């Protein structure tokens, strides 16, 4: 530890050399891009917009660049409307990345997770800082801050900011972004949420003036009509495979159309079957295109859905929350899952 290091306050301590190196990189970099994973969720967007706001407060030319657009439900997040999404502004997105001196990669552990931005980031001359909480990071970086034991990248970012003496740049708005990320990655502090650090951070964010009750209402308790209907329909259709302690929900393209589905409408659907005590894991497969099925999985205890997603659907994630894709029709994705099910029965014992 050098003389600049702060005595620890949190259980999680980020290596102080990493903190100092990030501070030096920021000092030396006028143009900064922040990016996060494709189909950004509350944690990806909350951490990215909070960091962007802090860097701007420090006088930096900072922009959040994402592969695709934020879901409607998160448009209320301060700063989210300034995001440059490559699906909507492809030239601006690639130009910002090409001209950046420094790129922050938040909430992902491999470049494939930024989808259409991967090539631009790979060929950019910018220095790279990764701040993430996914297992087994596989991404080149000048500074890698990887703490899988922390439940959200937003909480990890807050600890980083605290160690870097950057919390003074956090406003009520950017504090709300951090809180949103912490809340969404823990199901409103109902899982991965026993770490006392979380409550120290929440204490600080409340002191910054956030209205956590209002944020809960906005994020966890606000839905469109199409979302309420499709969530009910999905749960009604759920199939239980008791031999495998599995609940399966599938929605094909015709059903999505019938329910006027828009992105984000099925957020949280995969979690609902876990309320059933006999269910250990839950799979949701959504046919997003003629050859594209998005797969989401959730589990309880030691059942490793990240392993299932990695081995069967080219994806990954956390032990209890993971995802992947199947390139083909939904019926074939189902066959593929069913064929592989017996491989995972031993994790049920
Ligand atoms: P969700 O089911 O909410 O889309 O994703 C849950 C978690 O699984 C995410 O936080 C992310 O870590 C991981 N995940 C989701 N989709 C993918 C994917 O296509 N590839 C990888 N590697 N991880 C994914
Ligand atoms: Mn996350």
Image: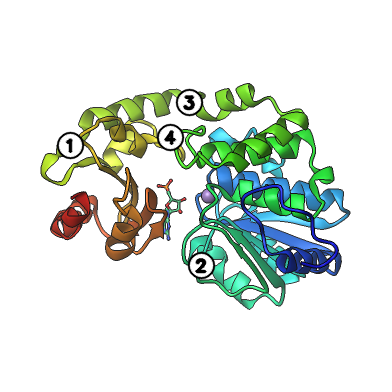
Q: Nearer the viewer, residue 53 or 278?
A: 278
Question: Does label 1 point to a residue whose CB lies under 8 Å from ligand 1?
Answer: no
Residue 315 in view here = yes
Q: Which residue is mark 2?
A: 137
Element marked by disc 2: loop
Name the side, left or right, on which 21 lies relative to 46. right
Q: Which residue is mark 4?
A: 265
Disc 4 + disc 1, Cβ < 8 Å: no
Disc 2 + disc 4, Cβ < 8 Å: no
x then y, percent, for residue 91:
66, 63
User: Which one is earlier in the sequence, the residue at label 3 or at label 4?
Assistant: 3
2 vs 3, front mark: 2
The Cα–Cα distance between marks 1 and 2, rounded to whole angstroms, is 34 Å
- Eyeballing the image, is 333 above or below 286? below
User: Which one is earlier in the sequence, the residue at label 1 or at label 2?
Assistant: 2
Element marked by disc 1: strand
Residue positioned 57% across, 26% down in the render: 216
Q: Which residue is mark 3?
A: 223
User: Which one is earlier in the sequence, the residue at label 1 or at label 3?
Assistant: 3
Element marked by disc 4: loop
Q: Which residue is mark 1?
A: 239
The Cα–Cα distance between marks 3 and 4, rounded to whole angstroms, is 8 Å
x then y, percent, for residue 154:
62, 47
x then y, percent, for residue 294:
35, 51
Element marked by disc 3: loop
Image quadrant holding the N terminus, namely bottom right
Q: Nearer the viewer, residue 21 or 10?
A: 10
User: Which one is earlier in the sequence, the residue at label 2 or at label 4?
Assistant: 2
């Amino acid at each position: 530890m050098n003389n600049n290091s702060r005595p620890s306050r949190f259980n999680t301590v980020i290596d102080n050399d990493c903190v100092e190196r990030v501070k030096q990189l920021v000092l030396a970099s006028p143009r900064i891009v922040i990016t996060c994973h494709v189909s950004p969720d509350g944690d990806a967007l909350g951490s990215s917009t909070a960091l962007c706001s802090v860097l701007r407060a420090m006088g930096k030319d900072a922009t959040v660049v994402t592969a695709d657009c934020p879901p409607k439900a998160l448009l209320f997040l301060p700063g989210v409307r300034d995001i440059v999404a490559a699906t909507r502004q492809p030239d601006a997105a690639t130009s910002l990345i090409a001209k950046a001196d420094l790129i922050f990669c938040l909430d992902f552990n491999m470049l494939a997770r930024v989808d259409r931005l991967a090539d631009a980031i790979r060929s950019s001359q910018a220095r790279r800082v990764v701040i993430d909480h996914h297992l087994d990071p596989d991404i080149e970086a000048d500074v890698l801050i990887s703490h899988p034991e922390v439940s959200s990248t937003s909480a990890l970012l807050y600890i980083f900011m605290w160690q870097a003496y950057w919390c003074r740049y956090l406003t009520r708005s950017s504090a709300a972004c951090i809180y949103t990320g912490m809340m969404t990655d823990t199901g409103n502090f109902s899982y991965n949420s026993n770490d006392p650090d979380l409550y120290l951070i929440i204490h600080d964010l409340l002191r910054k003036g956030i209205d956590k009750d209002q944020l809960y209402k906005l994020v966890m308790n606000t839905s469109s009509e199409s979302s309420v209907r499709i969530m009910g329909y999905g749960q009604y259709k759920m199939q239980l495979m008791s031999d495998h302690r599995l609940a399966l929900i599938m929605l094909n393209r015709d059903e999505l159309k019938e329910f006027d589905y828009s992105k984000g409408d099925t957020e949280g659907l995969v979690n609902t079957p876990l309320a059933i005590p006999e269910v250990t894991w839950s799979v949701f497969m959504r046919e997003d295109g003629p050859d594209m099925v998005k797969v989401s999985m959730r589990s309880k205890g030691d059942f490793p859905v990240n392993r299932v997603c990695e081995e069967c659907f080219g994806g990954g994630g956390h032990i209890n929350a993971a995802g992947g894709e199947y390139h083909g029709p939904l019926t074939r994705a189902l066959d593929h899952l069913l064929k592989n099910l017996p491989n995972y029965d031993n994790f049920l014992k």
